[in-house]
Amino acid sequence: MGIFSFIRRLMLVLSGPANDLVFLSFSNGDAGKIFSDHLNSALARAGLRTFRNADDTRRGENTESETRKAIQESKISVIVFSKDYAFSTRCLDNVVMIMDAREATGHIVLPIFYHLDPSEVRNQEGRYFEAFSAHDKCSQGEMARVEEWRGALRKAADVAGMVLQDRYEAKFIESIVKEIADKLNLSLPRVPPASQLSSALGSFFFFFLNLLEVKHVISWKSSTR
C-alpha cells in the first residue's frame, strides 16, 4: 500500500461511523498502564478507535451505565490482566459487564495476560489472592458482589487469550493488533516507513492519527448527552 492509499484509508476511517470501537480495560496501578498506552497507540495507528476504561479514568464522570453502553457499542473488549488489576473494584466491575455482554450477545472478548499466567486469574492466586483477601475484608456487606467478581474472572480466564511470557513487548503488541483485526475481519493498513514520508506528509500523517482519538471522544460525548 502506497503513501496516498494509506492516507485515503485514514480518511475513510475518520469519516466512517464509530463501529470499530475497541473497549480497553486496564489498571493504572502498575506497569500494565504503560503497556496499555502503547497498545492504544498501536490500535490508533491501525485505524481502530478505543474507549479506554482504566480504574481512575474520568473518575466521577464515567458512570456504570456509560461504561456498559461503551461495551455494548464496541465490537470487542480487550482486558489487560496485569499484576494489580484485581485490586481495582472498578476493573473487576468491568470484567463482570464484559462477560455479561459476551453471554447475552456473543460480544467478542480478548484477555491479555501481562506477566501473568491465566491460572493466576482463574484461581485468584498470587497477587490476585492478595487482592481478594483485601476485598473480603472490606466488602463484608457485599459478598455477593465479590463472588460475582470471582466468577467473572474465572470465565474471562477460560476465554482464549494472549500471554506475554518472555516475548518482546513491541512484537507482542503487534500480534495483539493483528489478532483484533482478524477477529473483526479487518485488513490492516501497512504503515509506510519513515524514509518514504516527506516532512510535510509525515506531519499530515501523524495529524490524522491524533484525530482518530479526538473524533471518537467528540462522537462519544455527543452520543451520551
Image: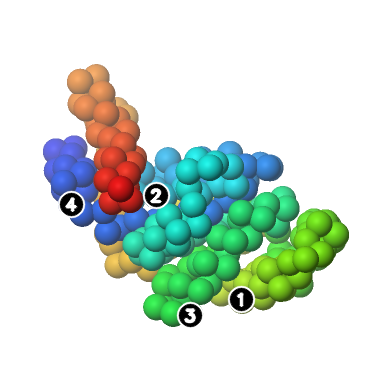
Q: Nearer the viewer, residue 94 or 137?
A: 137
| Mark 3 residue element | helix
Q: Nearer the viewer, residue 182 or 196?
A: 182
Residue displayed at 44% across by 79% down = 104
Identify the amino acid type marked 4.
Gly
Identify the amino acid type marked 3.
Glu
Q: Position of residue 221 (x, y in %)?
A: 32, 44
Give above or below for 33 relative to 138.
Answer: above
Q: Position of residue 136 (x, y in %)?
A: 82, 63
Q: Residues within 10 Å of mark 1 (few under 14, many from 20)?
A: some
Identify the amino acid type marked 1.
Lys
Residue displayed at 27% across by 59% down = 19
Q: Which residue is mark 4?
A: 16
Count the labels in the image. Answer: 4
Mark earlier in primary sequence (4, 2):
4
Separation of marks 3 and 4 at Cα, in angstroms: 28 Å
- Asked whether residue 54 is in view, the answer is yes
Q: Which mark is residue 84?
A: none
